[in-house]
Image (cartoon, rainbow, N blue to C red):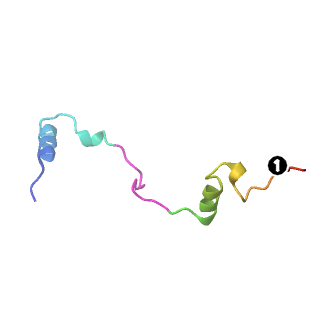
Amino acid sequence: MGATKSRKRREKQIREGKYDPANRRGTWHGILPVERTTPTLREALAKQQNKYKQKWNQTHKSDDSIFIFI
């Protein structure tokens, strides 16, 4: 396959003694930015418990109940 225009331009600049833009690019040190992990069961449960306000969460038990005595 042929080289792209941008690659040809970079190679020409390097031949002419100009700066190589590849030197400016950072490294990820072995980390893939597109790699994703699924949440653990504990993380998924914590997210579900904190999804809504605590006063409406049924799993949250507290003494903030309202009682009406007639």
> Which residue occupies the foreground of this view, 28 or 36?
36
Q: Residue 30 appears at what percent x and percent y?
A: 41, 55
Q: Residue 66 appears at what percent x and percent y?
A: 82, 49
Q: Is residue 40 above or below residue 64?
A: below
Name the residue furthest left.
2
Q: Residue at x 18, y 34 (%)?
A: 18
Is 36 included in the stretch rendered in magenta?
yes
Q: Is residue 54 shown left or right of residue 6?
A: right
Residue indicated by mark 1: 66
Quarter-wise, where is residue 21 in the image? top left
Look at label 1 and name its amino acid.
Ile
Q: Residue at x 85, y 50 (%)?
A: 67
* Label 1 Cα crowd, 10 Å radius (few <14 / some 14-19 / many 20+): few
Name the quadrant of the N terminus.
Answer: bottom left
Q: Residue 6 appears at what percent x and percent y?
A: 15, 44
Name the residue furthest front.
70
Q: Is residue 41 shown left or right of residue 13?
A: right
Is 7 included in the stretch rendered in magenta?
no
Quarter-wise, where is residue 24 in the image? top left
Q: Residue at x 63, y 51 (%)?
A: 52
> Which residue occupies the foreground of this view, 11 or 45?
45
Name the residue furthest bottom.
41
Name the magenta segment's main secondary structure.
loop
Count the labels in the image: 1
Q: Residue 35 appears at what percent x and percent y?
A: 42, 59
Q: Is residue 31 shown left or right of residue 10?
A: right
Quarter-wise, where is residue 19 in the image? top left
Q: Secondary structure at mark 1?
A: loop
Q: Which residues are magenta?
A: 26-37
